[in-house]
Amino acid sequence: MAIIKDMNQKVHGIDKRKFRNSIGDLADQLRLIEQKITMGTDNSIDINYKEQQKEINRVYSSVQKITESDNLLMSDYAPKAKKRLS
């Protein structure tokens, strides 16, 4: 009986049960806000990543077309390793 009575006691004019429920509601709202922010951020990152991949593929395709049409080899433009003088 003492536990039940203690749970319903008022502290500084506020019912403990109402206070606990209010804190729980606030925690739920914070979780929802965090989830929305996380989902928005993840979606934004995913969209940007896909756009950059498309751009990389477009540039790569253009370079391949240019090298094929001009009979150039990409290895001609790659930096050559220098021999070490030891």
Image: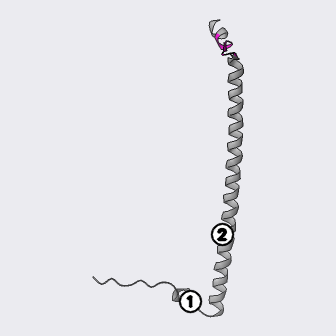
Q: Quadrant of residue 80?
A: bottom left
User: Residue 31 versus residue 75: which sits nearer the camera?
Assistant: 31
Element carrying mark 2: helix
Where, by quadrant of the figure, is residue 14 drawn? top right
Query: Residue 53 is drawn in which quadrant?
Result: bottom right
Q: Is residue 43 magenta?
A: no
Helix, strand or loop status at disc 1: loop
At 67% from the left edge and 83% from the top edge, which residue is drawn?
62
Q: Which residue occupies 70% across, 34% down?
A: 28
Question: 10 Å neighbourhood of mark 2: few (<14), some, or many (≥20)?
Answer: few
Disc 2 marks a residue whose amino acid type is Gln
Question: Up-down: is 64 above or below 12?
Answer: below
**On screen, 15 above or below 67?**
above
Position of residue 72 measured from the top left corner of the image (x, y, whole percent): 58, 91
Q: Amino acid at mark 1?
A: Leu
Residue 60: percent from the left, percent from the top?
A: 64, 79
| Sequence-earlier tag: 1 or 2 | 2
Considering depth in this image, is 29 or 78 the residue closer to the camera? 29
**What residue lies at 67% left-to-right and 53% top-to-bottom?**
41
Q: Which residue was labeled with disc 2?
A: 53
Q: Outermost residue toward the bottom?
A: 70
Residue hosting label 1? 73
Q: Is residue 33 above or below residue 84?
A: above
Residue shown at the point (42%, 83%) measured from the top left = 81
**Mark 1 closeness class: few <14, some 14–19, many ≥20 residues within 10 Å:** few
Q: Locate the N terminus by quadrant.
A: top right
Decide which of 76, 35 is in the foreground and name it.
Answer: 35
Q: Which residues are magenta?
A: 6-13
